[in-house]
Image (cartoon, rainbow, N blue to C red):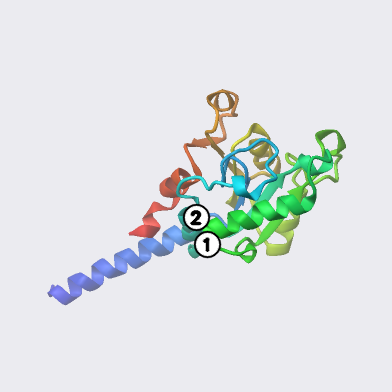
């Protein structure tokens, strides 16, 4: 076997490996915002207080380049409680996009659930209800069992389980991790999740 043949076989094996990896990639990630993409701030309404968590921008761009759809689903009951208007949530989101170096179109869908917990009936978009996830699955032809829900709270984890998705919890509080169901995987950060689930894409 000549050197050229050896190089071709190595290249072919790598192509087959990458092709197999792409077939096993999640169809989509459904992401919480506060405590997952940006630092958690109680009833955040000031865009000047937005701080990206380490590695988030790079991680999301890698996932997007791999062909995964990205959805943002955030509970913002501060609006429903009258603490701040929906425009404040939009300003915070816009600041987050600026820090990431993206625009809002980067996400394939965004859901801001403004209901208070006591307002969240069956038709509410407030997590752990899964109306948003079901709508996106129908619109984009997704199989939810091939998607991930990623957040930092038990509410986020329950959303993923309710929707039949694979579910990951970002470890913001040790007490939260102690209560997480066994089927939920725990990661130190979103960047950690992407590094462990997508790292072969960087080969």
The quadrant of the image that shows the C terminus is bottom left
Tell me if 171 is positioned left or right of 129 in this view.
Answer: left
Question: Is the Cβ of the residue at disc 1 closer than 8 Å to that at disc 2?
Answer: yes
Q: Nearer the viewer, residue 75 or 27?
A: 75
Residue 13 screen position, x and y as percent: 30, 65
Q: Nearer the viewer, residue 203 or 47?
A: 47
Question: Is residue 182 depicted above or below 87 in this figure?
Answer: above
Name the residue at 17% across, 76% down. Answer: 4
Question: Is residue 176 depicted above or below 17 in this figure?
Answer: above
The mark lying in front, picked from 1 and 2, is: 1
Residue 186 in sight here: yes
The quadrant of the image that shows the N terminus is bottom left
Circle 1 residue: 101
Q: Nearer the viewer, residue 145 or 30?
A: 30
Circle 2 residue: 57
Tell me if 163 is positioned left or right of 37 in this view.
Answer: right
Residue 197 screen position, x and y as percent: 45, 48
**Mark 1 surroundings: few (<14), some (14-19) or many (≥20) residues within 10 A:** few
Residue 180 screen position, x and y as percent: 59, 28
Label 1 to label 2, Cα distance in Å? 8 Å
Question: Is residue 61 depicted above or below 130 in this figure?
Answer: below
Name the residue at 61% across, 55% down. Answer: 95
Mark 1 or mark 2: whose residue is earlier in sequence: 2
Tell me if 80 is positioned left or right of 136 in this view.
Answer: right
Name the residue at 53% across, 25% down. Answer: 174
Q: Secondary structure at mark 1?
A: loop
Residue 40 screen position, x and y as percent: 60, 38
**Mark 2 surroundings: few (<14), some (14-19) or many (≥20) residues within 10 A:** some
- Number of numbered discs on residues: 2
Question: Which picture quadrant has residue 78?
Answer: top right
Name the residue at 24% across, 73% down. Answer: 8
């Amino acid at each position: 076997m000549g050197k050229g043949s050896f190089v071709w076989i190595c290249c072919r094996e790598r192509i087959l490996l990458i092709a197999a990896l792409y077939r096993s990639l999640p169809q989509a990630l459904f992401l919480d915002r506060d405590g997952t993409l940006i630092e958690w701030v109680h009833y955040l309404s000031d865009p000047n207080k937005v701080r990206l968590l380490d590695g988030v921008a790079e991680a999301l761009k890698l996932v997007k380049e791999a062909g995964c759809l990205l959805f943002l689903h955030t509970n913002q009951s501060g609006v429903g409680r009258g603490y701040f208007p929906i425009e404040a949530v939009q300003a915070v989101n816009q600041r987050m996009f600026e820090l990431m170096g993206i625009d809002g179109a980067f996400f394939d869908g965004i859901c801001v659930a403004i209901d208070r917990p006591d307002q969240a009936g069956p038709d509410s978009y407030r997590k752990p209800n899964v109306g948003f996830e079901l709508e996106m699955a129908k619109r984009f032809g997704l199989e939810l069992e091939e998607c991930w829900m990623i957040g930092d709270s038990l509410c986020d984890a329950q959303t993923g389980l309710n929707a039949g998705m694979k579910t990951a919890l970002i470890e913001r509080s040790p007490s939260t991790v102690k209560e997480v169901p066994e089927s939920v995987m725990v990661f130190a950060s979103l960047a950690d999740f992407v590094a462990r689930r997508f790292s072969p894409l960087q080969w």
